[in-house]
Image: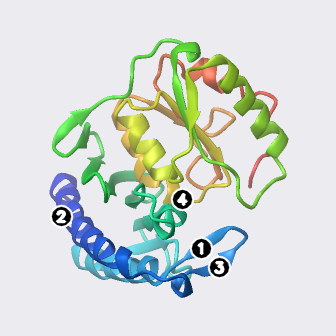
Amino acid sequence: MNLEKLTTAVCEVVRNVALFQRQEISRLRSDDVLVKGIHDYVTYVDKESEQRLVANLSKLLPGCGFIAEESPSLNRSELTWVIDPLDGTTNFIHGIPLYCISIGLMEGEELVAGVIFENNLNECFYTWKSAPSFLNGQPIRVSTTPVINESLFATGFPYYDYDSLDDYLAIFRHLMQNSRGLRRLGSAALDLAWTACGRFDGFYEYGLRPWDVAAGALLVNNAGGTVSDFRGHEHYLFGKQIIAANPFIYTEFLKLFDTWKQDYN
């Protein structure tokens, strides 16, 4: 399997679906927004985008499996695509121009390719196993900021699981007082992509799903960063908690999570 050639083909698939999303944004009405759960929304654009992605990715890898946000009935295989057809749906439905398509590929339990395409900036982040990470054809690297005090962080606000809210807010407070600041884009995939290219020095969030982090985690790793769960282990893809940072601040960053109480199974 030629992962470079495959990743290039995925970038083209994603660009075509992104064009569909841009065409639909002006047609979206309030009646098109459906509630999946607490503060969790979906539109026909999400669903149609996923159907198009599944159809085209199945052509690239016949017999592959899928882990997809809007299609829980799809099954895993030895080669499995991990799809978020529109990460940042709340931004999308409110007309906030920060949302993306995120595609990861797993071989067994290993992430081997990742593509994130941000529609409004026309930015395509991509990587594959043992390769650099790229943005629109140019190699990218994580930042070299040496300490938290000089770092800019990204995070995502919990919107349904509040059991760890006190722990989350304690870390938020510390970073607010001891860093250059925090940003909340509303898309975990973009938070990771922007960490991979050095715009952010670090990112953390809990309550996430595989499709939120698969492509972005590989981008950060291949751009020279470090990714883990809150215990410093590699259980971030299915463990619902993730931190990502440049290697200079990672250890200092991880120590902030020593008092985090909740683990996910």
Q: Image point 51% across, 80% down: which residue?
A: 71
Which amino acid type is shown beneath numbered disc 4?
Answer: Pro
Residue linked to disc 4: 210
Residue at mark 3 to residue at mark 1: CA–CA distance: 5 Å
* Sequence-wise first label, 1 or 2: 2
Task: Give the mark nearer the N terminus: 1 vs 4.
Answer: 1
Q: CA distance from mark 4 to mark 3?
A: 21 Å
Front residue (pair 184, 116): 184
Pair 4/3: label in front = 3
Give amino acid for label 3.
Val
Badge nearest the viewer, 3 or 2: 3
Residue 255 locus on image (x, y percent):
69, 22
- Nearest to viewer (mark 1 / mark 2): 1
Disc number placed over residue 21 in the picture, else none:
none
Most extreme residue toward the bottom, as rendered?
Answer: 31
Give the left or right position of residue 113, taking residue 5 as reference.
right
Distance between the alpha carbons at the discs numbered 1 and 4: 18 Å
Q: Specify which label sits upstream in the sequence, 4 or 2.
A: 2
As drawn, the label of residue 35 is 3
Confirm or deny contact between disc 3 and disc 2 (CB under 8 A): no
Residue 83, position as x, y percentages in the image: 43, 67
* Vertical arrangement, residue 151 with respect to residue 196, above or below: above
Could you tell me the amino acid type at mark 1?
Tyr
The residue that mark 2 highlights is 9
- The residue carrying mark 1 is 41
| Mark 4, secondary structure of its residue | helix
Quarter of the image for the C terminus: give it.
bottom right
x, y (%) of residue 180?
Answer: 55, 21
